[in-house]
Image (cartoon, rainbow, N blue to C red):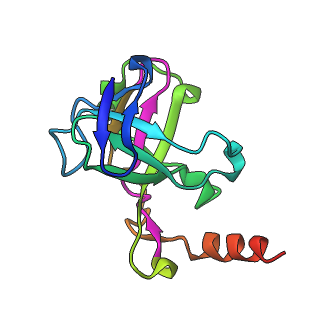
Amino acid sequence: MKAETRIFGTIEIEDEKIVTMEKGMIGFPELKHFALIFDEEKEEKDRTIMWFQSMDDGDIAFPVMEPHKALDNYQPKINLEVASVLGDFRDEDIYTLVTVTVPRDIEKLTCNLQAPILVNTKNNKAVQVIVENDYPIKYSLAHLIKNKTEKAGE
């Protein structure tokens, strides 16, 4: 699938790598197809921010990250009925992402631990859910910025 994007220009994503969200993202129900874009040259452990690029609207891309990079013991409780749109899956088939809010003041960078995106890696179906835990919508990532700054200064 080919898409014209605001951030990445023209991109071509293999059809089998397109993630389908039947219900779209919260606030964007019309957006059904996404691609996860990241720097392939970086090792997974060094990748923090990735992009969940809409293939339906090239102007829309959500910064995302793996939640365990923000909070080691992140264990969302998910309503299985809501997750049923993912089809059959085992826990190890689910790849979890959270959206990131990037304000002008980078020290106020946050991620949304309350509404993760769950991707079934076996069929590339995804859903954004509201977890049953009491995780914050705006979880500060200041500790990550501090750690990266300290490592860069070494």
Q: Is residue 135 above or below residue 142?
A: above
Residue 98 in sight from this viewpoint? yes
**Where does the N terminus fall, quadrant-wise?**
top left
Measuring from the top left, give residue 55's x and y in whole percent: 29, 35
Measuring from the top left, give residue 142's x and y in whole percent: 57, 76
Q: Who is closer to the viewer here, 105 or 23?
A: 105
Outermost residue, left direction?
A: 30
Left or right? Give the position of 94 relative to 125: right
Measuring from the top left, give residue 133's x and y in whole percent: 43, 56
Outermost residue, right direction?
A: 154
Left or right? Give the position of 67 relative to 15: right
Image quarter for residue 79?
top left
Q: Is residue 103 above or below residue 6?
A: below
Q: Residue at x 69, y 52 (%)?
A: 46
Q: Who is closer to the viewer here, 37 or 139?
A: 37
Residue 132 in sight from this viewpoint? no
Measuring from the top left, give residue 115's x and y in whole percent: 36, 52
Tell me which segment is drawn in magenta.
109-124
Left or right? Give the position of 70 relative to 52: right
